[in-house]
Amino acid sequence: MRAALLIGAALIAGQAFAQSPPWHNLGRAATQAEVKAWDIDVRPDFKGLPQGAGSVALGERVWEAQCASCHGSFGESNEVFTPIVGGTTKADIERGRVKNLELGSTFPQKTTLMKVATVSTLWDYINRAMPWNAPKSLKPDEVYGVLAYILSLAEVVPTDFTLSDQNIAEVQKRMPNRNGMVFHEPLWKANGQGDVKNVACMKDCPVETTIRSFLPDFARDAHGNIQEQNRVIGPVRGADTSKPAPTVPLGSAPAPVPVVVAAAKPAAGDVKPLLAANSCTACHGMTQKIVGPAFSDIAVKHKGNAGLESYLAIKIREGGVGVFGAVPMPPQPQLSAIEATAIARWIAAGAK
Amino acid sequence: MPPHLNDVIGRVLPAPENHLSAEKLELARKARRSFMGRALAMGAGVAASSAVATRAVAADGEEAILKLPPHTTGLGQSVATDGYGKPSQWEANLQRRQSPGLTRVPQASVSFTPLQGLFGIITPSGLHFERHHQGWWDIDPSKHRLMVNGLVKRERVFTMDDLMRLPSVSRIHFIECGANSAPEWGNVALPAVQYTHGMVSCCEFTGVLLSTLLEMCGYDKKNGKFVLAEGADGSSMTRTIDIDRAMDDCLVAWAMNGEMLRPENGYPLRLVVPGVQGVSWVKYLRRLEVGDQKYAAKDEAVHYIDHMPDGTHRQYTGIQECKSVITTPSGSQTLLDKGYYNVTGLAWSGRGTVKRVDVSVDGGRNWRTARLEGPVLPKALTRFNIDWVWDGKPAVLQSRAIDSTGYVQPKINQLRAVRGTRSVYHQNAIQSWRVAENGEVSNVQVF
């Protein structure tokens, strides 16, 4: 009888799995086209890599138009992001380990190519996240080309090289730090063991009597006035770091006066939040050149030009090159015409 | 009181009163006047007996007491004036803040939680630290989709409606950026606990267990060893999650602290990977792929790696090991007076539960065990408190946490002896705060 009931229950469940939970059918099947649209990752064994090819020359053209403004013409710029190229040698390519990562190196910075072990990582990241302001806009051949150009700058491939899905595995064998990554499982598993040991000594523990490191006086206000970053009530106050520290013991000087600083609201017509939100300030300083010219320099250069507002509004949205040198300004299509005009009006009025 | 008066006022006076006849209204007025008179007389007695001064005040008392302020003598704001409430205007100093010069592009930047001003273990949603890799978005939840693909029997797409119908759980966990405290690997670099430790937050997350989704989709139990989590932002942040982690306590979460996630924290959907560095808690989660090998995505092959003294890089070292920090008093704060302080701070471990926190006020020579305040939860911030009477002399405050695995939070020199000084990530050393005679607290390193 019991067996008969169970069979009956299974029949009622029909095609569904007999032991499935009641929420089993929520959601729907993904279509092949949907999986293809989103499954863009490329693994170290190159699973997921699309067919295609791109030469160093193609890559250089794409680079100059879309990448150089942040990374510099040779991938060595440290202005906006840390350098991609630099610090690797032919000997590193032979050995698969980067000498400049070892103790005693005086090379100032760790570049991407010094660290990365797998060429698939670079292909994947350029394809999914670059260029910065328009991710996923490069075609596969352009990704191959840009990667070929980067690798040629580090002499991993020759300057007449064409990188493709067919030869990328060979390139992997020349990655300068391909043997530089190690896997330490205890720090990957939640139930692993730490690699650094301390013991919980409670009394008369061995310690040095000197202070090894402290913040220098000139850095006192590097993070603003800490008094304005603490509550105005409670057991402590923020120190007034806009002034030198008191030199007398507590109680000899007047007590600090509480200060509440409300978050600043942008003034009407203030374009600075717009500049920050669209990364304009990553490349243009208010009064100093960064990658591109200072806003104040743009205002000075075009002073008195008729129709300056509309000229600048177009430049902002469409990009350009040549007015201030060879580094191009990438297009900013994400800005609406109204936003671009607001910025243009502000620059035309002197960028103040 | 005449018996019929009960009909008029009862125990609770009905209001508005104009439903009463003129005659009954007059009876009620008389009754109320006599009651108010008695109440006022009692109030005056209380005020006279509570005038106990704790610090020097003028002979007749403090103005804050003697002069009735507008909030006592005027009409206040009406209900729901602010449909979604904000903190008091007097709390405006506590804000998420950036560290100047740390990053050059605001879309690939971080903001720090003001740990110096928080209580308990829950981080207010609006003060949860931020880390964006290509800028944040406020995504229309009706158009957001989650796809599960790869080594599964049924590749599926879920809407937010589908996900929120599934059986959900709520868990309190900390999230810490792998680079929290990173600038201090070499030397002291930052003035205040907001900047040294503020890339940690702790919230109640609500969502569906990742294991529920993977089982619904029939993941390959033999070959499915890893899960790739991918976001829907420009960077499409990708991270490899170990299948054991994925099937343990990971959540696909839509809520934080009882409300939907904030956009800066991944609205409408993010992954929660308890105990593991924040970069793995992929925001704007759009895809989960089950695979048979690790993916070596950019942020696990170029960043979030540990630079060892022999020049190698340790990859996939995401567990946030046991750590603690004193938040009051802490760097760039100044003590108001000598005498008693409740020294308080936070401890956490990605491997389990905080078992004990010890505190030293003499730079690590002698230690006392602090009080752990409840709740003490696995992979969550734990609040500790300890009594301290400051004698006005220089002191160095430290806290040292021990977790359920017996791991003892190391000193910075012990960490460096194993991992060198060129690492960036996973700095969980004991923090030292020096209290000077002038009452100011500063960030120092002692061995």
Image: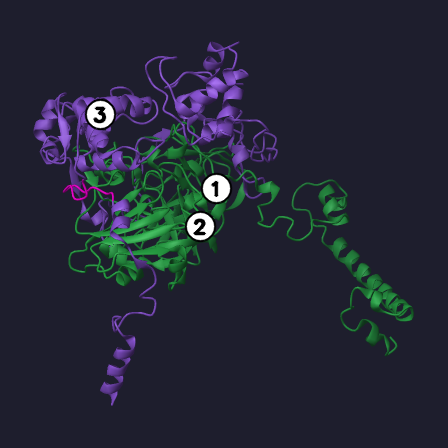
Chain colours: A purple, B green
- Hey, what amino acid is under mark 2? Leu
Quarter residue A207 falls in: top left
Which badge, 2 or 1, is on the more N-terminal residue? 1
Q: Secondary structure at mark 1?
A: helix
Magenta-drawn segment: A40-49
Find the residue positioned furthest to the right: B23
Residue B249, numbered circle: none
The label on residue B261 is 2
Q: Secondary structure at mark 2?
A: loop
As measured in the structure, the alpha-carbon distance from the residue carrying label 2 to the one carrying label 1 is 24 Å
Query: Taking A181 as reference, is B382 above or below it?
Result: below
Q: Chain of mark 1?
A: B
Q: Position of residue A107 (x, y in %)?
A: 22, 22
Residues marked 2 and 1, same chain: yes
Helix, strand or loop status at disc 3: helix
Answer yes or no: are tags 1 and 3 on the same subunit. no
Residue count near mark 3 (Cα–Cα under 10 Å), binned few <14, some 14–19, many ≥20: many
Q: Amino acid at mark 1?
A: Gln
Residue B440 on image: x %, y %: 49, 33
> Picture coordinates of residue B7 (x, y %)?
82, 76
The crowding category of the residue bearing disc 1, from other C-alpha atoms within 10 Å (few below 14, some 14 to 19, many at least 20), is many
Residue occupied by mark 3: A59
Viewer-nearest residue: B441 or A99: A99
Which quadrant, please, contains the N terminus of chain A? Answer: bottom left
Magenta-drawn stretch, dominant element (helix, strand or loop):
loop
Q: Which residue is mark 1?
A: B116
Looking at the image, do the residues carrying marks 2 and 3 touch, with CB atoms under 8 Å apart? no
Q: How far apart are the alpha carbons under marks 1 and 3?
A: 49 Å
